[in-house]
Amino acid sequence: MGELAVDKHVKYIISVEKKKESFESVVMEHLRLNGAYWGLTTLDLLGKLDAVDKEVISWIMKCQHESGGFAGNIGHDPHILYTISAVQVLALFDKLDVLDVDKVSNCILIHIAGLQNEDGSFSGDMWGEVDTRFSYIAICCLSILQRLDKINVDKAVNYIVSCKNLDGGFGCTPGGESHAGQMNGWINHWLFVKSDSNIVKCLSAAVTAVFCCVGALAIAGALHHVDKDLLGWWLCERQVKSGGLNGRPEKLPDVCYSWWVLSSLIMIDRVHWINKEKLLKYILDCQDTENGGISDRPDDAVDVFHTYFGVAGLSLLEYPGVKAIDPAYALPVDVVNRIFLSK
């Protein structure tokens, strides 16, 4: 089994930000805030956050829309998918105070609360798409800002529970297929990643219906709604012979599920049901040990998305030298403790 190429991965992440004129950077312009979260959280988990300039904070605030929500980049439309990344990055740098949530008329709180629908679900933006991703994000954001009282948590929980299926899993809407990684996107867009051989690889940033629902219920203190044995069995069956994890039956493994599946198993106390050693080897095998970065599968092209979730998976596996990450908030444990234990 190889070792984690920490220095190579740090160098890779920093290099991605500097290539602003590259093809990859141009096509990812509209979701740069998500990319900032993936890259910066990876650096923090590796103990290298000080390698970047804190001027990123001023850039993030320029991404805030007058509605209170955040866009993926300056001049783009706001969406809750980008708002969570803004809040998480500000938390990394201990700069949540710039949001001034103590103001009665605080716009980010009003914006998120205004996205809740009558049935308890959440829309992602003004256009009204509903998805359990958005339920998780709203609950996670407001919890980090310690303002969960701004929404109807009971209704939000009831909506999430309505998305539970007979196999113990959860869908993105009531009646939707259980999925540990629905490929319609954490950021709901396609990412184009160009490899060294100039072969363009198209990959979607996966989100987990299961993770979002379990994470939201965990933060809301409502995990009693989960059939932990039934869901745990469904999740542990996501591990394939290579040791990697997939998002649903008969699909290929992908490093990103090392986070989505593992975090859910930890939250329901069933992580001992998978082979951790085989998963650890799978993640390490997906590294580019020469140029840095982690890919979805061994020998594929690397990208920041999979680099983050690969390192996050190693954190959940308690890999030496990687900081602990909170399975519900997707932030380093020391950051979460600073938020909730400092007051």
Image (spheres, rainbow, N blue to C red):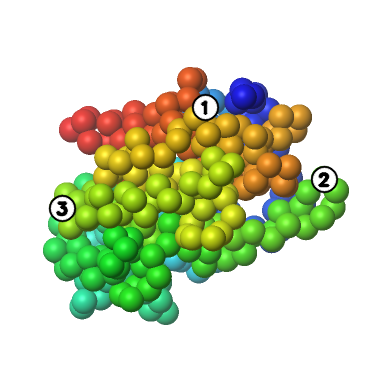
Q: Secondary structure at mark 3?
A: helix
Residue where numbered disc 2 is placed: 196
Q: Nearer the viewer, mark 3 or mark 2?
A: 3
Instruction: State the residue position of label 1.
Output: 46
- Check disc 1 and give the amino acid type: Leu
* Residue 80 percent coordinates (x, y): 40, 63
Please name the residue shown 59% across and 42% down the image. Answer: 242
Quarter of the image where the C terminus is located: top left
- Dot 3 alpha-carbon crowd within 10 angstroms: few under 14, some 14 to 19, many 20 or more: few
Tag 2 and tag 1, C-beta contact below 8 Å: no
Dot 2: what SS?
loop
Lower sequence index among marks 3 and 2: 2
Tell me the CA gap for discs 3 and 2.
48 Å
* Image-based side of 99 in relation to 43, left or right: left
Mark 1, mark 3: which one is toward the viewer?
3
Looking at marks 1 and 3 on the same chain, the residue that comes earlier in the sequence is marked by 1
Residue drawn at x 52%, y 27% is: 46
Q: Which residue is mark 3?
A: 224
- Seen at 73% across and 42% down, the residue is 299
